[in-house]
Amino acid sequence: MVAAGLFPALAAPPNYFTRTWQVEQGLPQNKVTAAVQARDGYLWVGTYNGLARFDGVHFSVFNDHNTPALHSRRITSLFESADGTLWIGTETGDVAQYKDGHFAAVPRRANWSGGKIYAITADDAGEVWLLNEAGELARVRDGKTLSPPAGVVAKVVSLARGPDGTIWVEREGRVSLLTRGQLQPVGFAATNSETYPYIQGIATSRDGGLWVASNGGIRKWKDGGWAADLGNAPWGWNTVANFMETSGGVLVGGTSSDGLWLAFPGQTNTSALHFTSTNGLPSDWVISLWEDREKNLWCGTGAGLVVIRPSNLETISPPDNWKSRSVLSVLPTPDGAL
């Protein structure tokens, strides 16, 4: 049974402000493929011209020229495991790790089709897994390779890791669950005339479920059935390969050509926020997403690194848009009007 309205309404969507870093501010390259905040507070950023460590002001750059353990400067994925190791995947399929101030190359063991390392994660047993661009999985320890079933959404693959270490894999529109080193295809229950939903993206929820963007809508799968239906997605039928739920319960969808969407469960689609190259993003191509410990949203785009922060400021926009004139002064009244 699909239930709607299971989430308490959030407060009115807050305003946000953005800040962008590009090559001019020290970023090694403007195409930002991955970002992760390490335990020590540094933000690690992957680009196609090296790995950068960001302290909030300066970028320190590591690449195949100054760091031999990085066999390629084209970084495509980052992940920090429970023991504090930073795992680094590249476009050539090479993997490196950084721990205690030292980089080391990781031997290749997987017998798979290769290609770039699209994502890295760890399961509930602490085993580190790699996902390549073909949608195949490989376990780092012994190279064990798994091939999830594929659907019809060509060249779209993603990983979603739940708070308990549960790993969901989407491969071209089909979803599988990785448990105890084995894959279990997820047979989503059909609704109406569906035989299998057209999957546009997946994201784990804070309560252990799985958000599924499919058929132009958003639903949550939990305990073997649909647990919530939020109706139409603000991004429509766009693929959201970068899809996540923030610690505050906001659903974030990054697209390849339509920018970034923030959806607020419990509210109508009209409350969704849309960031594009016209209002805060340097590019409409969203490549990666990450939320740091301060609840800031980091967005890697095709033209720079962006941080999106909630703001306490509210922009006043009357219906007549001030008649296209500049506002020169304001005065509050005792009854709260302006």
Image: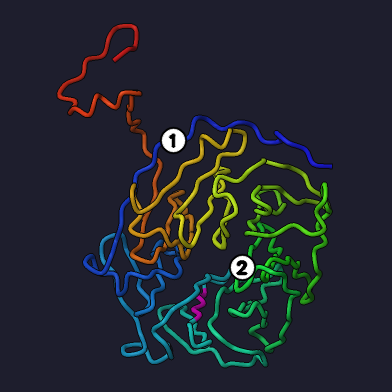
Q: Is mark 2 on a helix, strand or loop?
A: strand
> What's the magenta bit mostly, secondary-structure-wise?
strand
Residue 147: x and y in percent read: 73, 80
Q: Earlier in the sequence, mark 1 or mark 2?
A: 1
Q: What amino acid is found at the position of numbered circle 2 in the picture? A: Ser
Give yes or no for residue 88 being in the magenta stretch: yes
**Image point 60% across, 54% down: which residue?**
237
Q: Mark 1 points at which residue?
A: 14
Give yes or no for residue 258 being in the magenta stretch: no
Q: Please give the count of numbered marks on the rendered protein.
A: 2
User: From the viewer's perspective, is 86 left or right of 101?
Assistant: right
Q: Considering depth in this image, is 22 or 40 the residue closer to the camera?
A: 22
Tell which residue pokes out farthest to the left in this image: 328
Q: Mark 2 points at which residue?
A: 158
Residue 81: x and y in percent read: 57, 71
Q: What amino acid is found at the position of numbered circle 1 in the picture? A: Pro
User: From the viewer's perspective, is 265 left or right of 173?
Assistant: left
229 w.r.t. 177: above or below: above
Residue 336: x and y in percent read: 34, 12
**Image point 45% across, 61% down: which residue?**
286
Q: What stretch is highlighted in magenta?
A: 85-89
User: From the viewer's perspective, is 196 left or right of 318?
Assistant: right
